[in-house]
Amino acid sequence: MTAERTARKLIAVGSGKGGVGKSTLTANLAIALARVGRKVGLVDADIYGPSQPMILGNQGQKPVAREEKLEPVPSKYGVPVLSMGHLVEPGRAIAWRGPMAGGALTQLVDAHWGDTELLLVDLPPGTGDVQLTMLQKFKPAGAVLVSTPQDLALIDAARAGQLFDQAGVPVVGLVENMAGYACPHCGEVSDPFGKGGVEEAAGRLELPFLGRIPLDLAIREGGDSGTPPAATDDPLAQPFHDIAAKLDVWIGAKS
Amino acid sequence: MTAERTARKLIAVGSGKGGVGKSTLTANLAIALARVGRKVGLVDADIYGPSQPMILGNQGQKPVAREEKLEPVPSKYGVPVLSMGHLVEPGRAIAWRGPMAGGALTQLVDAHWGDTELLLVDLPPGTGDVQLTMLQKFKPAGAVLVSTPQDLALIDAARAGQLFDQAGVPVVGLVENMAGYACPHCGEVSDPFGKGGVEEAAGRLELPFLGRIPLDLAIREGGDSGTPPAATDDPLAQPFHDIAAKLDVWIGAKS
């Protein structure tokens, strides 16, 4: 453990359940923090379903190894990233048992992150090997939990929260994703995944509520095309910047 | 391996990415198959995020063990089920490393399934220990893959498909979920997760396309409240019954 290592803070972004927008949130938070001058990197620890190369638009690039450690891959948003998606062929199944998945996480975190002061870790869903390896080897300074307002997703988010809690990792707060969908025809907002459930759950679990991100075609398309909203001046960037600002304050308070 | 065991067919329901509605699809397919007279059981292999007890409305019930094997828990829809959700306290993190997760799967599949002829296995997202244990110990007769039309989800679905392919498990077909959302205000349909991507991917991968399930509040609420649409006479039951009929034909052809 060098001085360089201990000075760097890890923030885990987890969800319990998959498909709630964790990777999209992580990428947009990283970009928002880079835009306010933080030196931030991103580890895509979703070993079985890495999506950051697509979201950050640096698919097809390969990280080089130097002195047996990987060099992070730059992205055009000022956020270097390491992902299994940079190491395996697109569409190939990563059929690994747990210890190998834990080993892969180690390669991605213990890399040449240089002067990166903050590392956001996009965790896979669940509470398995990758989470356990991270908690044991690279204890994060804090964890951000994301969920849709749906009951089933909230149960899993509470499970993930408990895992961090047991490991003594403070939960920075909860983010509600896919909240509110404005009909492109009439403009009226409705809630295909329900409404307010995450803020309510945050209250019940006595955790801060960090904000709400709408369900919006443009966020999905931005992710599919490598142009995350936080990198643009679109109004959709705002919720990500607001949440990033709260995270920034939290990190500042912990320093 | 007894005659009883070899006569029973396993159908895996997988997705690559989480949060695409795999558990909802599995529960509704099982109910639809039970309604046409199949003796069908359900294994909730999503060890880290078990949601079947909530979807099937038998939360809080505990399976009993007899001669060191579990007895499936009945549900009011004629579908017995075994899930980690029946074995652990709600909200507790299941912080297990891979080999334990694989062991849990064994307990759920190798149980007193009696005259159950068809076992639908709701897989966790990804291509990790649970999938590998299942392929090695309980080779399924076929796999149904579900995805949203979003590119990021499709990439992961292709990865899961490749895993089954490598193991010699035929893919029955692909299901598109969260396709088309009818605005509750104006009734117009739009596509927050895109449209047609799964049918296109099925064509590209030369796999059958089994059908499309809309994004609908009532499906989510049915899942959250233990009343899956396939058990009702709601028009939302129809796509599930149509897909179940195709699965039934496929299974019949394999017998």
Image: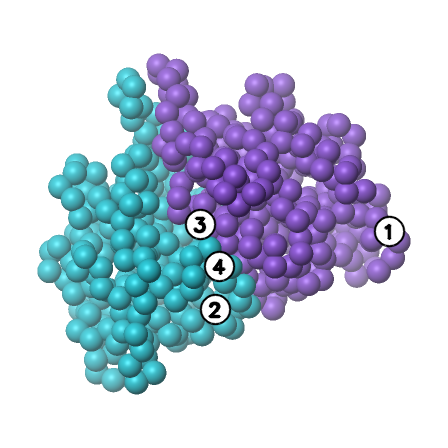
Chain colours: A purple, B cyan
> Which amino acid, by three-letter code, is at mark 3?
Ile
Residues flagged by tags 2 and 4 on a common chain: yes
Judge depth for marks 1 and 3 and give the one in front: 3
Image location of residue A237, percent across then percent down: 60, 24
What distance separates the C-alpha of mark 1 from that of mark 2? 36 Å
Instruction: Report the front residue among B250 and A166.
Output: A166
- Which numbered tag is attached to residue A155? 3
Q: Chain of mark 3?
A: A
Labels 1 and 2 touching (C-beta < 8 A): no
**Could you tell me which residue is drawn at 16 percent across and 44 percent down?**
B232
Q: Secondary structure at mark 3?
A: helix
Instruction: Report the front residue among B25 and B84.
Output: B84
Labels 1 and 4 touching (C-beta < 8 A): no
What distance separates the C-alpha of mark 1 from that of mark 4? 36 Å
Can residue B253 be seen at all in this image of the molecule? no
Residues flagged by tags 1 and 4 on a common chain: no
Q: Quadrant of the C terminus of chain A?
A: top right
Residues flagged by tags 1 and 3 on a common chain: yes
Q: Residues within 10 Å of mark 3 (few under 14, many from 20)?
A: many
Q: Secondary structure at mark 1?
A: helix
Labels 2 and 4 touching (C-beta < 8 A): no
**Could you tell me which residue is drawn at 29 percent across and 23 percent down?**
B184
What distance separates the C-alpha of mark 4 from that of mark 3? 9 Å
Going from N to C along the chain, the mark reached first, 2 or 4, is: 4
The residue where tag 1 is placed is: A4
The residue where tag 4 is placed is: B92
Residues flagged by tags 3 and 2 on a common chain: no
Q: Secondary structure at mark 4?
A: loop
Q: Residues within 10 Å of mark 1 (few under 14, many from 20)?
A: few
